[in-house]
């Protein structure tokens, strides 16, 4: 039987998983510094959540969701994105009643979309995301953007480009919507079937079409900026002013359209500039979604958030040649020679590990020379050698692998000796 991994998924093997752990540690730390708390939601939800929360005119809902019926006949969907689930939890658990507002949350986890797999775009992929729910202060928009930018910079990524747009409030969007319909309607038959279906339902999504992106009507389409009312324009200007004060550079792109229906006012993407990234240059997308909480049955609670792909982040770091500090080796490799020392090695390892020392030994009955080669492969800082003679004398030989310095140590003092040596090298 030839059983293989499903298309669009991947095994994250040792040697690579450490890189994931490293960027995850940065993610958790920066969210802590910004005072965001972690939330963990189910991998599958009721299908209606995404139909209402993401929007039934989006490609995600129409083409990309993994939907199935359970044994009770209920329609469930593997989550294609994180925001709808977080907002559902916010409403269901009445977090709007907490005295700490806005409710600042972050998440990490796998998402699922049925689309053509390619580099940086998988059917099962992992997202980091944040959601700040409960405030319509432009300052929280600027904070969310700053968190994303700071995270990327701390991973070592360079060439970042922040792109901003405003989708306006409900009044502004309606005026822009009417203008888009008038603009595209006379020649809508020249566009793809998806765009034709979107014309009356959500014409803004036409601007995000990849198939018709070179159509001349795209370039001449009405800009949302020209339809922002005074309140929306002031909001957008305030966000820009706050970013200027934090010295975060950005570019205004009136054509920036987020792919989900719930966005309004601030929308942004973080892209990467430079060679080697192919067609996928967007690392992060996000924006404000006033109205989504009400759509899912909660009180009026404006929100803003973003999500980023871990796969794209790691791909970008690799293209830029950024070496993540993950292959540091172990602290000590225990070499045992003889039956009694080998038996004693298990207890010696246990003591070292309980003291916080990263240690290992041979389990394949290798000769001493092969054990030393294993210590080299594992990049051990120290090698502790215990033979029959040392065992009978209650001692052990410790070798510093870089300097070659050797020291005979009382066996019951090994852990203390190693801890002092390791701490002195930090």
Image (cartoon, rainbow, N blue to C red):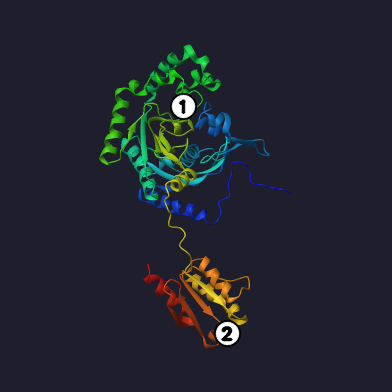
Image-based side of 372 in relation to 288, left or right: right
- Numbered disc in front, either 2 or 1: 2
Q: Can you say which quadrant of the picture contains the C terminus? A: bottom left
Label 1 Cα crowd, 10 Å radius (few <14 / some 14-19 / many 20+): some
In the image, residue 214 sits, relative to residue 11, either above or below, namely above
Total marks in image: 2
Dot label at residue 117: none
Position of residue 345 measured from the top left corner of the image (x, y, whole percent): 56, 76
Q: Residue 418's spot in the image, x, y percent?
A: 44, 75
- Say whether residue 338 is left or right of residue 28: right
Q: Which residue is mark 1?
A: 208
State the CA–CA distance, disc 2 to disc 1: 73 Å
Q: Circle 1 sits in a helix, a strand or a loop, which is it?
A: helix
- Residue at left offset 49%, top offset 26%: 209
User: Residue 326 location in percent, x, y?
Assistant: 45, 58
Q: Is 96 left or right of 111, judged from the image as shown?
A: left
| Residue at left offset 48%, top offset 52% | 20
The residue carrying mark 2 is 388
Can residue 54 be seen here? The reply is yes
């Amino acid at each position: 039987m030839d059983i293989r991994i499903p298309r669009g998924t991947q095994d994250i093997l040792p040697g690579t998983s450490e890189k994931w752990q490293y960027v995850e540690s940065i993610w958790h730390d920066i969210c802590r510094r910004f005072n965001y708390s972690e939330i963990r939601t189910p991998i599958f939800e009721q299908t209606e959540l995404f139909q209402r929360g993401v929007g039934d005119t989006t490609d995600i809902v129409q083409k990309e969701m993994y939907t199935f019926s359970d044994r009770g006949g209920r329609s469930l969907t593997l989550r294609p994105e994180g925001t709808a689930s977080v907002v559902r939890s916010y409403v269901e658990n009445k977090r709007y009643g907490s005295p700490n507002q806005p409710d600042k949350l972050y998440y990490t986890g796998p998402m699922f979309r049925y689309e053509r797999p390619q580099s940086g775009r998988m059917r099962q992929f992992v997202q980091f995301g944040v959601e700040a729910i409960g405030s319509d202060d432009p300052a929280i928009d600027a904070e969310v953007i700053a968190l994303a930018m700071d995270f990327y910079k701390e991973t070592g990524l360079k060439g970042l480009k922040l792109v901003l747009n405003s989708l306006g409030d409900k009044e502004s969007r309606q005026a822009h919507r009417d203008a888009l319909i008038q603009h595209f309607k006379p020649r809508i038959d020249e566009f793809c079937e998806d765009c034709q279906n979107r014309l009356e339902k959500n014409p803004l999504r036409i601007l995000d079409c990849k198939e018709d992106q070179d159509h001349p009507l795209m370039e001449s389409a009405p800009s949302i900026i020209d339809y922002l009312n005074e309140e929306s324009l002031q909001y957008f200007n305030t966000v820009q002013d706050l970013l200027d004060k934090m010295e975060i550079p950005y570019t205004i792109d009136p054509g920036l359209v987020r792919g989900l229906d719930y966005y309004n006012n601030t929308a942004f993407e973080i892209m990467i500039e430079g060679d080697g990234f192919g067609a996928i240059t967007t690392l992060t997308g996000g924006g404000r979604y006033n109205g989504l909480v009400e759509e899912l049955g909660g009180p009026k609670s404006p929100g803003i958030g973003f999500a980023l792909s871990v796969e794209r982040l790691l791909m970008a770091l690799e293209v830029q040649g950024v070496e993540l500090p993950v292959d540091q080796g172990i602290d000590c490799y225990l070499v045992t020679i003889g039956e009694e020392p080998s038996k004693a090695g298990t207890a010696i390892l246990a003591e070292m590990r309980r003291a916080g020392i990263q240690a290992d030994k041979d389990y394949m009955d290798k000769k001493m020379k092969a054990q030393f080669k294993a210590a080299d492969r594992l990049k051990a800082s120290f090698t502790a050698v215990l033979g029959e003679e040392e065992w009978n004398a209650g001692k052990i030989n410790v070798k510093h692998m870089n300097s070659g310095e050797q020291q005979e140590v009382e066996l019951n003092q090994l852990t203390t000796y190693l801890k002092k040596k390791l701490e002195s090298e930090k």
